[in-house]
Image (cartoon, coloured by chain):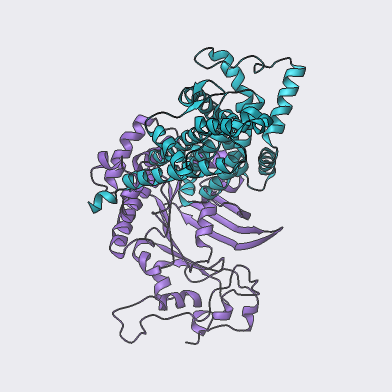
Chain colours: A cyan, B purple
Amino acid sequence: MRSIARHPLLRRLVETVLTLFGVAVLVFTTLRAIPGDEITATLGTEAAGLSAEQQESLRAYYGLDKPLVLQFFSWLGNVLTGNLGFSRRAGATVGEMTANALPVTMELAVLATIVGLLIGVPLAMLSASRPNGVRDGFGQLVGLAALSVPNFLLGAALLTVISRYAHYNPNAQGFAHFTQDPLLNLQQMLFPALILGFGLAAPIMRTARSALLEVQTQDFVRTARGKGVAPWRLRVRHVLHNALNPIVTMTGIQFGYLLGGAVVVEQIFSVPGLGRQVLAGIQQKEYAVVQSTVLVIATTFVVVNLLTDLLYRVIDPRVRAA
Amino acid sequence: MTALLELADLRVSARSGRADREIVHGVDLTVEAGQTVAVVGESGSGKSLTMLAVMGLLTDPLRVTGGTVRLGDRDLTALSERELRTIRGNDAAMIYQDPMTSLNPLMRVGDQVVEAMTAHGVPKAEAGRRMLDLLARVGIPDPKRTARAYPHEFSGGMRQRVMIACALAMRPRLLIADEPTTALDVTIQQQILALIDELRRELGMTTIWVTHDLGVVARLVDRVVVMYAGHVVEDAPVRQVFSAPQHPYTKALLAALPDPTDDDRPPLAQIPGRPPAATDSVEGCPFRPRCAQAVDACATRPALQPRAQGRAACWVPPHEWRN
């Protein structure tokens, strides 16, 4: 029994469940701490004109009259049975909404991550090939710029310039899902992915640069040079390969942020992702929408983390053995 | 005999700030084809740096700041990185000190040996076949299976065998073995030394052993080059070095070797003081502050001068030494 309880997989599972429960509690209480509820959000100032009975019956309708603990567990119980709640605003269940938004967010996150890696890693290799040289200065400068420019600025600027001067704005029309119109979908995803990817490139570049610099000084790199290995093979097969773990870690974390944190860019480019779903939920005080969506995001985050761990095993035979 | 390797006034410096700090101060060294030479000295004497400079493997902030390295008829210091690459691992190969860190942890050992050949244009399939032979030759059991293993699955001795296979893959003319047994268990040390020596004979390689322990390689070499603080202080046939050292430092090194057959000798003699740090600028003979034989003339640095056999950099001839 002891040995089963100590199994890393089981421990991991318990940790995950506890984490998700913590997230649920946190979101639930934070939401309740925001002034107003769905009644005031729907009726605005007119809510004050309602009679006490009307108020009472509305509160009962939304289930707001029950004790908080009861509200929490009734929601959690529903979630566990697959009922994520209903959005009056959208006229759809949170399950349906999420089924639409999650693929969009995932697609955007994957594309942005690819962009971030395609910019960040080569830039880091360029920087590390001659530390403190001109290339390194250039790479660091681009990294700093990418880190410093807020993406709402970049997004708004890009959208303005492209639509105004190039008369190209694929995001002006309704959003097309990849399954409906892949070509239009990719066009609509292009700019948000570029902007998010640019922001992503900075931390990836910094992490990769320091990892590459560290690996470069290791003995086995000297061995490879001593064998007469060509520079490109040396940089990729020996140096980059050994620097992958920190890069994967950083990318995994950043990917997690993208799942819920792309709200601003989703808003600017009218991409109906999870971020917008949460935002709308908060504005409407649709508690179930926010709670359930955040829980979905957190679960996805956990899964991504798990995949990152699996990736370590693919990269490093020593992890596989352990 | 013809010289295979010829170092003339080779200087290695470390860049620190804007100034260069010289660490190897003009090494002259000639190794004849087929000869086996030991380069001996304490850590910090510049012996490893000199050899890395020969291979063109110095990395920032270290670099060659003077002199030439001739291998055969080519001056390696004048070659581009691209040209050097065709020589490294091909004409000249090196075995390194620490086999635990000298292999890429993420690459199968077989691939690392194969790479030593494909880097020089050997087709992959042929390199694969030769790799299996090489692994067998360096004493790795069941090469077909072990070639697919990763370095962490190997012991230190086994890893050093893989390193030897990498170094010998292209049958280099020059082999530099940089303290190849220092990081290994004593029991394994002898096996590795014997293996390298055996392969040296078999392939007729000119070999340079770099070591801080003269006792380890005494039986394997023709000649001994003693380095101290970035200078060659003595260069002589191995018999003479042991029977009649021409430099007080060489003599002190020998006295520091344990000799279980001699009861009168203290178990481990020490050389008083310590070698100058690379940051110290030493006037005159670098060994002077620690030397029992120092005289006024030592304030000027002695050049390597011919002795009956070999060369030594000392103003005081052995017959004038006080004990």
Name the foreground residue: B267 vs A262.
A262
- Quadrant for residue B242, please give it: bottom left
Q: Position of residue B99 (x, y in %)?
A: 39, 54
- Quadrant for residue B291, please give it: bottom right
Q: How many marks?
A: 0
Q: Is residue B200 above or below residue B269?
A: above
| Left or right of residue B124, residue A286 in this image | right
Name the foreground residue: B143 vs A279.
A279
Name the foreground residue: A217 vs A143.
A143
| Left or right of residue A132, residue A78 in this image | left
Q: Position of residue B308 (x, y in %)?
A: 48, 71
Q: Is residue B111 visible?
A: yes
Q: Position of residue A296 (x, y in %)?
A: 47, 33
Task: Tell me the residue at 59%/17% (across/down).
Answer: A175
Name the foreground residue: A202 vs A7.
A7
Q: Is residue B52 above or below residue A309?
A: below
Residue extending furthest toward the top: A181
| Left or right of residue B240, residue B130 in this image | left
Q: Is residue A196 visible?
A: no
Q: Is residue B218 above or below residue B32?
A: below
Q: Position of residue B252 (x, y in %)?
A: 46, 78
